[in-house]
Amino acid sequence: MTAHLPPTLLFPHPVIPAPGRVIEVAPGVLWLRMPLPFALDHINLWLLADKIDGVEGWTAIDCGYGNDATRALWETHFAGTFAGLPLLRVVATHYHPDHMGNAAWLLGHCVGGDPLLWTTQSEFHTAHLVWNQLVQYRMEDNAVFFRRHGMPLDAERHQAGRGNLYRIAVPELPQQYRRITGGSVLSIGGREWETIIGLGHAPEHASFHCRALNVLISGDMLLPKISTNVSVWASDPEGDPLRLFLDSIVRYTDLPDDTLVLPSHGLPFIGIRSRVVALADHHAARLAELLAAASALVTAYDMLPVLFRRPLDVQQQFFAMGESIAHLNHLWHHGRMQRAVGIDGVVRFSSVPHQE
Ligand SMILES: [Zn+2]
């Protein structure tokens, strides 16, 4: 979902880095941007000054989409930004292609340092499940799943639901990794970065908090302008990722409110608490609209115009369906919706009338 929310945040770095250039947003923390070939437009990556086994160099947090445009920009950074120092380490917040797309390629450019991808176990595993199209991790499985939730599977949608888009964006994946877990502390350039796990957007998304710098690298878990995608997919059809997401973002409010947040999309910002409140309000409003719209039986497909007040192309409908089911499942798990499977095999929901 990409609803825009009220601006209650501070943006201390309002100018974005030009392609191939960087902006230092905290001591030893460089902000770079890479293009994305879809509506999201860009991803922010972070380069941290590091030192491993006495060798000075850089640690990359996230990798960019695995295409020629991003790799050409990385080459520009190797030749300029890196100031003659090597890439020592690669960290991925989660498995999505704009974050892990170049992980294997970047590791191939590490000199010394630590040539294993640092990420969480679920993110590493899920990357391989999707890349290898195993069990219920194929696009076709999601197409069948979305048809059960009312999406017509006509020829156009059938075509859109085929192929392995992930492998296009992630041409190769690291075959091994170095596991990080919640609370893992990464020592980067002599400073400690604590891992905070977030759920609901990806299976085991890692954010990193440096108390000494008062900086949080939030990845996709906390974005300043758009609400993070929270979807149900075929592999976990009755899940409640919205509950997981809302519970996860509350944890960030334990951090100092003047923390500088470095998100994967949008501008660095200050104002964790107001952002978390705005996101909770945003989802509460969407849930209330669904409850009002579902007085009679509805499908997740029927609810797309309620959640997304703009035309969606077929590709966007696939992602919108995941979000629609996430909101309906959430209401169902909380006793606010009933769920029934019709003799046509289609899942439908209806609001539970208020008990007086
Ligand atoms: Zn993501």
Image (tube, rainbow, N blue to C red):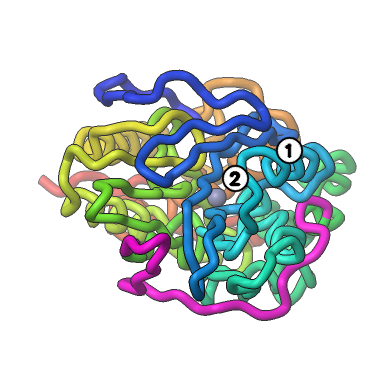
Which amino acid type is shown beneath numbered disc 1? Answer: Thr
Q: Read off the residue under disc 2.
A: 321
Quarter of the figure that contains the C terminus: top left
Residue depicted at 69% across the width and 36% down the height: 36
290 over 46 or under it: above or below:
above
- Left/right placement of residue 151 relative to residue 267 reads right
Q: Which mark is residue 205?
A: none
User: Is residue 240 at least partly visible in the picture?
Assistant: no
Residue depicted at 46% across the width and 49% down the height: 219
Q: Position of residue 245 (x, y in %)?
A: 36, 54
Q: Are marks 2 and 1 in contact (CB under 8 Å)?
A: no
Q: Which residues are magenta?
A: 168-193
- Left/right placement of residue 24 relative to residue 89 reads left
Q: Read off the residue under disc 1.
A: 76
Looking at this view, is 215 or 57 the one in front? 57
Q: Position of residue 131 (x, y in %)?
A: 76, 67
Tell me the SS state at disc 2. Answer: helix
Front label number (2 vs 1):
1
First along the sequence among labels 2 and 1: 1
What is the total number of numbered labels drawn onto the structure image?
A: 2
- Left/right placement of residue 8 relative to residue 231 reads left
The image quarter containing residue 321 is top right
Q: Position of residue 163 (x, y in %)?
A: 86, 55
Looking at this view, is 337 or 65 the one in front? 65
Which amino acid type is shown beneath numbered disc 2? Answer: Met
Q: Position of residue 240 (x, y in %)?
A: 41, 61
Q: Residues within 10 Å of mark 2 (few under 14, many from 20)?
A: many
